[in-house]
Amino acid sequence: MKNIKLNESVGHLFHIINLNMRKRLEKEIKAFGLSSSHQFGVLLLLSKNTMSQKEISEATLADEPSTTRMLDRMIKKELINKRRSDEDKRKQVVYITEEGQALLMKILPIVATHNEEIASILEEEERKELFRLLQKIESKL
């Protein structure tokens, strides 16, 4: 059996980077009562107008029970709501509320600054290469 060193594990490095980035961002958006999962859900919904709960689960790679809990918390905060689909009355769709949109407009600059600060660690060519490599890995998974 081959001995694996954590500091040479791509998966471990991705995990550590993800944890550090999420922790840093969550600290900044906590004042708005959001977690990164809430923020991502709101952004996702805004970009699509409406989505089914299943579509949200698939897009976030979360299981349906986790998605249900996230959506319930967001409904309780009045960031989103559900209604019957116009196309299929048997289906419910989730949509962003005015409160959700207003909150999103407040946090977008924070998210943008967060992304810029992290991206600034690398030179322009390094960023392009990193994105190319990450997209290559993602396309094979």
Image (spheres, rainbow, N blue to C red):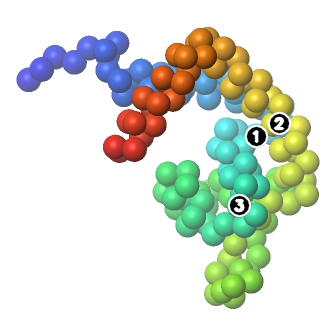
Tag on residue 48?
A: 3
* Quarter of the figure that contains the N terminus: top left
Q: Does dot 1 land on a helix, a strand or a loop?
A: loop
Instruction: Give me the residue at 60% from left, 16% from top.
Output: 124
Give the residue number, with chain letter if any, for mark 2: 107
User: Of marks 1 and 3, which one's residue comes earlier in the chain?
Assistant: 1
Task: Give the amino acid at mark 3.
Answer: Lys
Please give left or right for residue 9 compared with residue 86 in the image. Answer: left
Disc marking residue 58? none
Residue 92 placement: quadrant = bottom right
Q: Nearer the viewer, mark 1 or mark 3?
A: 3
User: Residue 32 or 100: which is nearer the viewer?
Assistant: 100
User: Residue 106: x and y, percent?
Assistant: 88, 38
Q: Which residue is mark 1?
A: 34
Q: Are marks 1 and 2 in contact (CB under 8 Å)?
A: yes
Give the vertical position of 18 relative to 5 (above or below): below
Alpha carbon separation for disc pair 1 and 2 = 10 Å
Q: Secondary structure at mark 3?
A: helix
Tell me if 14 is positioned left or right of 100 in this view.
left
Q: CA distance from mark 1 to mark 3?
A: 20 Å
Q: Amino acid at mark 1?
A: Leu
Is there a contact, CB below 8 Å, between mark 3 and mark 2? no
